[in-house]
Amino acid sequence: MNQLRLSQQSNIPSTTIPLPSSKSESNRVLIIDALTSGENQIENLAEARDTQTMIRLLKKDPPIYDVLDAGTTMRFLTAYAAITNKQKVMTGTPRMCERPIGILVEALQQLGAEIHYLGIEGYPPLAVNGFSEQKTDLITIRGDVSSQYISALLMIAPHLPQGLKLELTGKVGSRTYIEMTLELMKQFGISHTWKGNLISIGPQPYRPTTYSVESDWSGASYWYSLLACAESGELFLKGLKKESLQGDSKIVDIMAQLGVASEFKEDGIKLTKIPVLGLQEFDFTHCPDLAQTVAVTCAVIGQKTEFTGLESLRIKETDRIAALQAELAKFNAQLQEGNDGAFTVIPSVSIPDEVTIATYDDHRMAMAFMPLVTKTNVVIEDPDVVNKSYPSFWNHVELITATINMNFSQN
């Protein structure tokens, strides 16, 4: 297994980080572009493996859509294949085939798609055999499951002969991702209404346009964490804007409590250290991808915090709750499970001279634990997992200082 060794670096020199483009925006825009027959001018698409996989599959249109480990690509392409009457086998890595998709498949079947499971019911691989006729224009779906199911249905809604009314039941999680999808659709000419828990989209054509994808706020979060954990420093993150479609821009408010101030400039955002105000609790329902980053930050800087809204973390690239608990324990921190789905970060009081972090085939585990380098020497196992969303991540870490040694070794 490859390992990457990072030497302790407590002070961060003034550095500009050229952030990658948003994977979340890119993958949505690619589906919308495909539904517009590729008549748009799309700029600044993400370098992420998930996005590059989507580009390749849409361009080559093979009979088997092998999405590798890309959950968004799996969900979006399943709906896309159904509405465009394509006959496709949907599959991916072993872990991808353990991630549930039954709620989306059931919704598509209710609408009129013919989809069959090729293995365990409720999970990939699938056989998509196209669309017959629309059987209903009203679908009820749980709001507390993956927002990717909801986004997948919303993006194909304008192509349905009767349009779609999507009723969300119960607690709505990752609302900002649903809002992102609807706002991107609006950029391409699609109107909608969202009243209470009912989203309505009538049949209408996407309109070709020019769109440039914003830099990635999820990727930005790791640099916020690095500065929060450091003794001193200053960073400039290129390509971010204050009015963002991305829910992970919430990191600005979170890190303002954990010791990092944000100053928006014309071409990005300047980060500086400020006193820690304290973060007693936070609900990650609408930005679950920030949970790992914030957990590590709190554990390192001595901030005891209660986390809620972590329900979706168990069905990500790995069981992120179990992974966090195991890796935080390596430097004497904890993520304690309490009542009613609440978890408490118990910060470390003593950090070993070196910590080896397992990454569980999960890109966010590798990046979230990188800021530990401000307190000790860190070994990251299987560092290439970052290619899923941020292939240039370790190159950007290398910009911080030459004393962070980017040496790969084999076990």
Image (cartoon, rainbow, N blue to C red):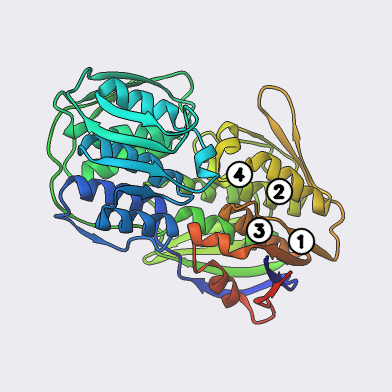
Point 59% across, 71% down: residue? 397
| 267 relative to 97 in the view: left or right | left
Amino acid type, label 1: Thr
**Pointer 2 or 1: first along the chain:** 2
Between disc 3 and disc 4, the foreground one is 4
The residue where tag 1 is placed is: 356
**Pointer 3 or 2: first along the chain:** 3
Residue 268 location, quadrant? bottom left
Name the foreground residue: 344 vs 204: 204
**Pointer 4 or 2: first along the chain:** 2
| 343 relative to 26 in the view: left or right | right
Residue 386 seen anywhere in this rendered image of the structure: yes
Name the foreground residue: 317 vs 126: 126
Point 16% across, 53% down: residue? 209
**Pointer 4 or 1: first along the chain:** 4
The residue where tag 3 is placed is: 228
Identify the secondary structure beneath mark 3. helix
